[in-house]
Image (cartoon, rainbow, N blue to C red):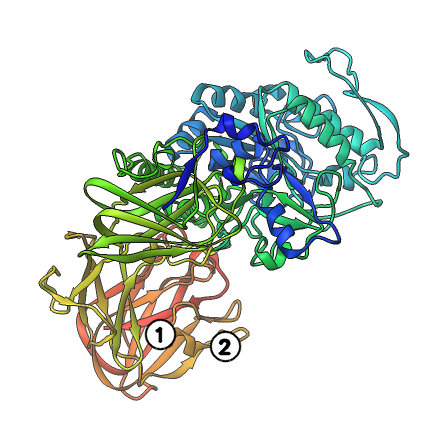
Amino acid sequence: MKMRFIPTLTLLLFLGGCSSADNGLTMPTQNSYKVEADDTKERIIEKAAHVVPTANQLAALQDEYIAFIHFGPNTFTRMEWGNGMEDPKIFDLKELDTDQWCEAMKAAGMTKVLFTAKHHDGFVLWQSRYTDHGIMSTGFRDGKGDILKDLSKSCEKYGLKLGVYLSPADLYHIENAEGLYGNLSKYSKRQIPRAVEGRPFANKTTFEFEVDDYNEYFLNQLFELLTEYGEIHEVWFDGAHPKRKGGQRYNYPAWKELIHTLAPKAVIFGREDIRWCGNEAGDTRDTEWNVIPYTENPDTTSTFPDMTDVLLGGRDQLYKATYLHYQPAETNTSIREGWFYRDDTHQNVRSADDVYDMYERSVGGNSVFLLNIPPNRDGKFSDRDVESLREAGKRIKETYGTNLLSGAKGPKAMLDNKYETFALIENNEIVITTPQPITLNRLVIQEAVATHSERVEAHSLEAWVDNQWVEVARATNVGYKRILRFADVTTNKLRIKVLGSIMTPAICNITAHYYQSRAPQLTYNRLAGNKVSIEPAKHDFGWKPHGKDIAESLNIGFKIFYTIDGSEPSAKSKEYTAPFEMNEGILKAVAILNDTPGAVMTEQVGMSKDAWKLAGATASVNNRTADKAFDYNNNTFFQTKDNQPTPYIAIDLGKVASLNGFAYTPVKSATGSMMAKGVIKVSQNGRNWQSVESFDFGNLINDPSKRYHRFNKAVKGRYVRIETSEIANNGKSIAIAEIDLF
């Protein structure tokens, strides 16, 4: 193994244009490179290996985990998209606690927060000089409140960087007759900022741009945001656009000049600095390259496409480029279902498992993790959001706060935990030895992208186990940071192998860590063929789920044990390996990981539904037929037509059975169609019915979980009829995901 340690200062002497094979550079490094018509594939790849981030882009990458704050009229209307015509007084904020926001974000491990100063509705959350459509026209602090100012002070107090989101789209100025957006005004030279009597700026910088009315308005607001709220580290331009008018164009070069002058440390999202990862699910690409192809010069163009391709920066993509440009990705999603707060009853919140998993996937996948936390109508983060943030932050700190390679032998520049030092890999492998055996399940590796770009295309990790090398993990690129996740391994020697690269890679940091896995919570499913399955419970989060198996990535190595006789399960109980036959009864199960058991699942398993047939039901809507109430699938459901008298379902069990009760699984997405009260009846022939008992399921709206009703004494019958006498929340129909009998 041959490596060279190049001190950063020495290396920088070469960046002005000198060439040296000794430092791994053969040409100057730049933020962008033009691909010439006569460039060979080899030359294109060589250029790609010399595309590096700007100082601001590197700082943005090093922030790693940042927050988004969506707040505004939508918080009070419970809408995702406003229309621009909302009365400002709808924003009925009474209290505000930005310290609470920052305390929670700090506990989560976040380093920066992006605030939606103006969303697409055009409503502003600071005391702007240039509009009355905003917080100045509300009752909050008698119209003198300034949420951005409060947040700026809190960020300073808690040591968080601040960024601002200013929507280019503005429905208020689109929908109003006197609105500036698309009003076909002529371009003319105008001074920014426009002076407003009685409200001078402390910052005396001025600009002169050739712009129309809306661009002038936008630049004036940018000037306010960038000069009156402390240092701004990111400016976020959303590409979403609910409506256009008048052929309005944006003078992006003017915006850019203003930002670069007034906020020299800020990166610009949605333009040449930072890009979208391609979805809002918190799901980064398995291979996320930051050196990516462009068809136009990213330094001069005003058009930046959404980059949603599965692979952006591989060799085949780079060969098609006109320009090669360094542009990191932000992997963004919301902790809640939607960008804005709606309520604490129906709006699901991501679990700590989910947040932590996405952190490792995104930060450890060469991108920045941007997590939205929407404040509630009390001006705070809700308790569930805070709990999830704190727990995920605790896990991040516990895992990555301890480097198991401290004191290890290997390339010093890679093991000193300093990003500024690095070493070249010339024989495609790195060997690290620890003084004593360590147990690890995470390895972090970083390339020196600031000086040598991203060059690793594929790599693997091996551990010395039982006197031989054993591969424990394999991945594609590295870039700024790659987190390898694998099952626990104990060893005193590690080997990283570079399996593919563009030129010689430079590695600046390698650390090893241990994540204390948690045994997952369990759930069961009744299956056809009188069988039962047991599996880790999946977090119920329907809004833009990232589709990854959290239990598999975080809880590697757990085993499930179960009983069917009512006894408590343990490691001595029967191990679950596959669905098994079970008649009705009490099922108990527990997951055990590293000799530590999780929570015990206890479930009343109903009888097999294989022989059941529909014996009658109230008319259904669309394809939500009554047979879907007993098809072993909670994702399908029976729903009646509206306003039917005494909605019911009748089931033929196929034989006379002894019944002790029933279970009702409501449809969480249909909160206005839940069986609150009713009567259950039995029959021997399907014609003559005997009332058994009435049932009452309270608080379904707030807790739409599976409900059980147990009879005072067992009854016998072949036919069962369930009638609804009251629908929750005065609904008009009933919906049933599943009926179970026991």
Question: Can residue 667 be seen in this snapshot?
Answer: yes
- Quick check: 316 above or below 34? below
Residue identifier under label 2:
619
Between residue 219 and residue 118, name the one nearer to us.
Answer: 219
Horizontal arrangement in the rendering, residue 184 relative to residue 572 (left or right): right
Q: Mark 1 packing: few (<14 Cα in 10 Å), some, or many (20+)?
A: some
Q: Are marks 2 and 1 in contact (CB under 8 Å)?
A: no
Q: Position of residue 207 (x, y in %)?
A: 78, 21
Tell which of 384 and 474 is nearer to you.
474
**How many numbered marks does the figure carry?**
2
The answer to whether residue 80 of the structure is visible from this angle is no
Callout 2 environment at 10 Å: few (<14), some (14 to 19), or many (20+)?
some
Residue at x 77%, y 30% (from the top left corner): 254
Residue 616: x, y in percent? 41, 82
Q: Residue at x 34, y 58 (%)?
A: 705
**Is 206 drawn above or below residue 76 in the view shown?**
above
Q: Quadrant of residue 474?
A: bottom left
Amino acid at pointer 1: Tyr
- Image coordinates of residue 348 in percent, x first then y, are 43, 49
Q: Is residue 348 left or right of residue 280?
A: left
Q: Earlier in the sequence, mark 2 or mark 1?
A: 2
Res. 62 mark: none
In the image, which is nearer the foreground, mark 2 or mark 1? 1
| Above or below 179: residue 197 | above
Q: Could you say whether the residue bearing mark 1 is in a helix, strand or loop?
A: loop
Residue at image mark 1: 632
Q: Amino acid at mark 2?
A: Ala
Residue 359 in the image, given as x and y percentages of width and height:
42, 44
Distance, label 2 to label 1, CA atoms, is 21 Å
Q: Name the element at disc 2.
A: loop
Q: Nearer the viewer, residue 453 or 674?
A: 453
Q: Residue at x 62, y 28 (%)?
A: 125
